[in-house]
């Protein structure tokens, strides 16, 4: 089953402006839209391979409020 994780930049901007923490991540599959501030991605054996983090009050030093963390090897193309 294909799953898409969408980062809604409009929600991030709204949260900054209003000082709120509305979930900015949408996890979409064939039947549901689920909303969250943190998403954990698992492999077929249910081991964590990555996570998507939204942290509005503790951004990274570069200013990013939403990012992906992983211990797995990452290949760029």
Image (cartoon, rainbow, N blue to C red):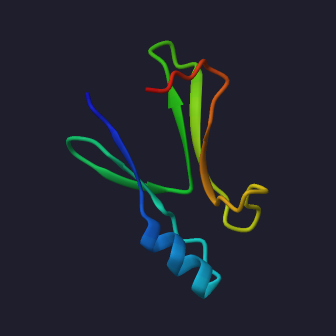
**How many discs mark residues in the rendered view?**
0
Q: Residue furthest top?
A: 45
Q: Residue 35: x and y, percent?
A: 43, 57
Q: Residue 1: x and y, percent?
A: 26, 27
Q: Residue furthest bottom?
A: 18
Give the residue at x 27% y 42%. Answer: 29
Q: Is residue 5 above or below residue 18?
A: above
Quarter occupied by the C terminus: top left
Looking at the image, residue 9 sits to the left or right of residue 57; the answer is: left
Give the residue at x 52% y 76%. Answer: 13
Q: Residue furthest left?
A: 30
Q: Quadrant of residue 70?
A: top right
Q: Is residue 35 above or below residue 2?
A: below
Q: Is residue 16 above or below residue 55?
A: below
Q: Residue 46: x and y, percent?
A: 52, 19
Q: Residue furthest front?
A: 77
Looking at the image, residue 77 sits to the left or right of residue 69; the answer is: left
Nearer to the camera, 5 or 64: 64
Give the residue at x 45% y 66%. Answer: 9
Q: Residue 30: x and y, percent?
A: 20, 41
């Amino acid at each position: 089953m294909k799953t898409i994780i969408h980062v809604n930049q409009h929600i991030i901007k709204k949260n900054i402006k209003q000082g709120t923490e509305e979930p900015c991540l949408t996890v979409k599959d064939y039947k549901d839209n689920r909303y969250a501030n943190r998403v954990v991605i698992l492999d077929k054996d249910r081991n964590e391979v990555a996570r998507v983090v939204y942290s509005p009050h503790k951004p990274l030093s570069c200013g990013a409020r939403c990012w992906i963390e992983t211990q797995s090897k990452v290949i760029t193309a």
